[in-house]
Amino acid sequence: MKHAGDGATWDRGTEWLRGKGDAADVVMSSRVRVARNLAGFPFTTKATHDDRVQILDLCRRRVMGGEFQQAAGAERVMWIDLHDVEELEREVLVERHLISRQHARGRLATGAGGADAPRAVAVSLPDERVAVMVNEEDQLRIQVIRSGLALGELLGEIDAVDDALEGGLDYAFHPRFGYLTACPTNVGTGIRFSVMLHLPGLKLTGEIERVKRAAEDMSLAVRGFYGEGSEAAGDFYQVSNQTTLGKSEPVLLHEMQREIVPRIVDYERHARRTMMDKRRRVLEDKVHRALGVLRSARLMRAGEAMGLLSHLRLGVVLGLIDDVDQHAVNELMLLVHPAHLQRSVGRPLSQPERRIERATLVRTRLGGDT
Amino acid sequence: MKHAGDGATWDRGTEWLRGKGDAADVVMSSRVRVARNLAGFPFTTKATHDDRVQILDLCRRRVMGGEFQQAAGAERVMWIDLHDVEELEREVLVERHLISRQHARGRLATGAGGADAPRAVAVSLPDERVAVMVNEEDQLRIQVIRSGLALGELLGEIDAVDDALEGGLDYAFHPRFGYLTACPTNVGTGIRFSVMLHLPGLKLTGEIERVKRAAEDMSLAVRGFYGEGSEAAGDFYQVSNQTTLGKSEPVLLHEMQREIVPRIVDYERHARRTMMDKRRRVLEDKVHRALGVLRSARLMRAGEAMGLLSHLRLGVVLGLIDDVDQHAVNELMLLVHPAHLQRSVGRPLSQPERRIERATLVRTRLGGDT
């Protein structure tokens, strides 16, 4: 298969863009990921080409069997051999948070691999709620994702999916350490919980750095919209647990779902209320200007678009803007990125062309002038 | 008379806001001013209170006689004793370019005078094309103003008005030096030609400083929207001749009307064409963003408003924006200033209130969201 799927179908389906669920005013999406490796094979970093091909083959057969699809609640499962698709298609998958940037390139942290390295991703359709990367740093990285704060439900889902895979794959497991992983920070339960938080209120009140530091002091990683090393574009922050060894899944879940995330959500809501009560004009000015610029600009960089969409999303959530749908805003947060933009236009675009097409896209989608 | 006139009438009438006339794409307005003093009285700087009252009385009788009104082509003439009106009313006159800031305060460069100093202005209605300041630095400062490049016509008009006044007033005149004035730079013909130029193209191409220096090298003064010491808000530049001694009126007129101003107009048009040909997207982006922000902001400072209106005016003149009238844009360039804003709201406004009311005004006038 050369193409990573039909864009129109994708854009309709993606569950985590819906803006539904608990605390969806602040929590854009929740994600749970586990790392698994097969017994009898070296880790990907040490694997030969033949090892990789064998692993890929074993995983494909299991993933494309009926049990996985059923456990994932999918209408169908799409398997994409990443070494076989064009770079643009791989970038689209990165922008949709279905594969890591590292997996798109095929190059591991150790320098092993490359664009031709045998590797794949399986995606549940139509809603993209389950994805399995094969031959990433770990041989299997399974993720489930959905909108709102839903780490508990996701844990149940990933357990079912994980069991469905394990039923036909021999996972590397150590009786004392648990699931073995390439990176020691994932050993044990091998689980990572993460949430994508929208924190424009804390940014506006200037409290964001304090909250970030507090999260980091609790051993949480705070990253940007596109994970490790990416900037916090548009006031979006990905917060996840760092270590998995020595803590059980229920304990990790409880900390994230019941303690830490609700506290940050409370801080953010408090900051928004403060702005609404004490600096309402400033807030209204910001959100309406954002919409005004999005509806009128002829050139726009991705970073600016994310910043404006962030303010617009805040305005929609707070009821300050009533003629724009939150789902439309969430969708644009994907569509303004280079690969999606080029896919929607249907051809490769230079940097200057992207600025034009990006502005046209947001203007059109938000009912601006033409 | 306590009030400086009915706002609604004024805003409709002002001729120089119409955006008509020669080179109106670049020349917002032309203005000719002469300075006159009465024989037998000391200059205003040395005048006693009684002198001032006497001068005011002589001038009022002459100005309010029928000859001046006829020469000015006015339906009626409004006389305003500035020592009798409130500060806000005086500020409105400054913002309309009918009196100088110095005349509003009543304080001369020497430090003489004050808010109570007997002084006045006469304004031709309804179009405000002729104004006579009495007891400014010179005892009479007559100005005629209209839209577009029209210094020749204005010279004819100011001659007629000057003659009508001279018919009943004894001007201080020296057979060798000409009309005597308080400041030596005005001695001789006592005439000053000036044009208000809109130079956003030269600003965008980065050539504005070079053109400014060239103009200054030709002994021209280059000032901002509100004259001496004011910033060039919104890319508006007031260009005028500095000295009047030793050059005849026809020579000064020829230099300004036929040589210098047309050359700057050509530069500006060339800069705009370059932008249209080579950086059209950048230009479209700027003008549409300007309109987008003007139509959506909830808070706005005067300086930002002038900058956005400047870009909007450029877009309208170049046909890039077709649903906004140039006259409306020109009017807003007055209405966003503090005194006009407060007059339109009907009460004094604090700085923060002004930002709110200014944003509301431009949004409403330009058909933005409400």
Image: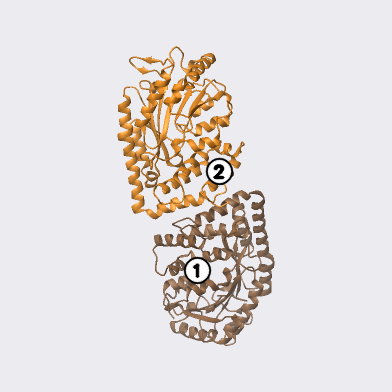
Chain colours: A brown, B orange
Disc 1 target residue: A95
> Three-letter amino acid code at disc 2?
Arg
Which numbered circle lies on residue A365? Answer: none
User: In the current view of this chain or complex, which residue is farthest to the top?
Assistant: B40
Percent of width and height locating residue B287: 44, 50
Q: Quadrant of residue A341?
A: bottom left
The lab-note entry on whether marks 1 and 2 share a chain reads no
Question: Of circles 1 and 2, which is in front?
Answer: 2
Could you say where residue B359 lies in the image, as x and y percent from the top left?
Answer: 55, 46
Identify the residue under disc 2.
B358
At a point 62% along the width and 52% down the height, the residue shown is: A205
Kind of residue sitting beneath label 1: Glu
- Tag 1 near tag 2, CB within 8 Å: no
Query: Could one spot residue A271 in this view of the protein?
Result: yes
Check disc 2 and report its element: helix, strand or loop: helix
Residue B131 against residue B204 in the figure, above or below: above
Q: Residues within 10 Å of mark 1 (few under 14, many from 20)?
A: many
Question: Label 1: chain?
Answer: A
Nearest the eye: A5 or A362: A362
**At 60% across and 71% down in the image, what residue appears?**
A146
Distance, label 1 to label 2, CA atoms, is 41 Å
State the image coordinates of residue B326 (x, y, percent, origin top left).
Answer: 44, 45
User: Is B260 on the left or on the right of A17, as rendered?
Assistant: left
**Residue B182 seen by the camera:** no
- Crowding around mark 2 (Cα neighbors within 10 Å: few <14, some 14 to 19, many 20+) is many
Residue A223 on image: x %, y %: 56, 63
